Amino acid sequence: MARIYQVPSHTRLWLTLAVTFCALPQLLKGPLWQGGLFALVIIIRALVNRQRIALPGRIIRSLLLMGAVALTFYSFGRLYGPEAGVALLVSLFGLKYLEVVSQRDAYVLLVLGFFVCATSLLFSQSPLMFLYVLLCMVLLTACLAGINHSDTRASGMQHLKRAGIIMAQAVPLMLILFVLVPRVAPLWNMQVGNGKARTGMTDSMAPGQISELSESSALAFRVAFDGDMPPPAERYWRGLTLSHFDGRAWQQAIPRGMDEARYLYGGRGPTPDWVDALTAGRGDGTSYAYQVIVEPTQRRWLFAMPVPFVSEGGVSLARDMRLVANNPVSQRQSYQVVSVPAATRRLPLAAEEKALMLSIPDESGRRARGLAQQWRLENPSDAAVVQQALRYFRQQPFHYTLRPPKLVADPIDDFLFRSRKGFCEHYASSFTFLMRAAGIPARVVVGYQGGEQNSLGSHLLVRQYDAHAWSEVWLEGQG
């Protein structure tokens, strides 16, 4: 016996609009086949509503389901994770629309629609996206009102008006819950893939392989100062130094000939000569005392301004002026630091470090190498070459953008001479390469810059969107 279609005719248009609007953000950024599948579903549903054809049978729906699963796996290489999971959910959401006959089927579709429109916030939390999700919720609510309206002469605009009233009535309750209910990290703070990288610390840096830099407001660490707070220009919180470059990625490395025992000092055993040199500079210039409370990272790196001195156990000082925890930071951890920026002049540059910080692959950045060598011939001193490079970046049409084009062939030359669009990683990588090509020891430093000052005036909140990469060069007599 044929089942009777229980969705009123005055609600069918709203149901189609709600399904389409909820899925649209994923369809715009997803694979092309997904948009084709969804268009096929909408066409079939429209013909069924006009009684031109019958609903597809179970066999056809099963084939469409298996095809959607197979194409999702083909496009993403997996069926789990934010990108693949959302794509599969939206595809199944569209296929579910083909099964709607009874009122119960419509309920299931609309409840699923609320989840689908919320997944848009996984990839964008902009005000426009919030308004778009709100529009989707109004359409879904209008459908809920419509499928429960038995009057066949009812107008679709009545359902939209009723949905607006229901949403307006929910606003006071929403505000009360927002103030009184404790807030935890939202679902959309998770890491997402597909060529995107959230701002935050990683143990390597590959400019040109990241297609988009998204922003995260998650807290990285807090800083409480004991005394004066440094000016914004000095709030560079170093976490890692990346000295090895393979032509595409910068990575943390210990110079050849040095072991970790010589490179890290945790306060036990004989004091290395470089620690003595830094300690002799504790009285040089201004110092800042502060406490850092870092969030769990499951990594060993810690954050501090240069040059950091710590007296507590469990924290080691590396020769490249960064702090390293003895164990991965698996829970919130605090440590006291005294930073003396001027002490960097005291740190000697070992031959092994100099060799590492001058190394560049032979096949990388051929045009950049020629430009740097030209600067070397034109300028007598290292400091003059640095200024020449800075002028180059200021005078040429470089643009800072969070959505740079991908650099496929040679990340250095492509950025310097073709795209000239990127964010801090692109600039730090290319500048460091140019310095090395000109014979100046240089490395990339990644960490955070700045911080949000709280109302009390002595605390800083450093968030993931404060993540930054910069270049560090060695100048004789300056460190």
Image (spheres, helix red, strand yellow):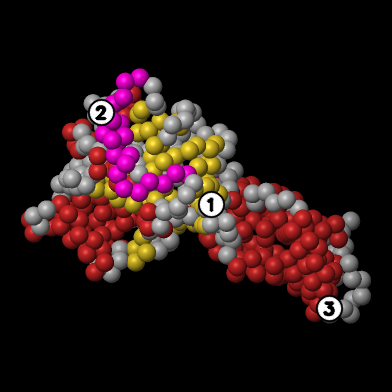
The magenta stretch is 269-290
Which of 441/228 is in front?
228
**Amino acid type, label 3:** Gln
Q: Which mark is residue 104?
A: none
Residue at 77% of width from left, 55% of height from top?
180
**Amino acid type, label 2:** Asp
Residue 208 visible to an observer of this rendering = no
Q: Are the two marked residues, 1 and 3, in contact with CB atoms closer than 8 angstroms?
A: no
User: Is residue 276 magenta-colored?
Assistant: yes
Residue at 62% of width from left, 59% of height from top?
120
Q: Which mark is residue 273?
A: 2
Measured as percent of width and height from the top left, residue 226 is found at 49, 46
- Badge 3: how crowded within 10 Å, few (<14), some, or many (20+)? some
Q: Which residue is mark 1?
A: 459
Q: Is residue 289 left or right of residue 101?
A: left
Residue at 24% of width from left, 48% of height from top?
473
Seen in the picture, residue 473 relative to 34 is either above or below; the reply is above
* Quarter of the figure with the C terminus: top left
Q: CA distance from mark 1 to mark 3?
A: 53 Å
Q: Quadrant of residue 271?
A: top left
Which of 153/67 is in front?
153
* Quarter of the figure with the N terminus: bottom right
Q: Which mark is residue 158?
A: 3
Q: Earlier in the sequence, mark 1 or mark 2?
A: 2
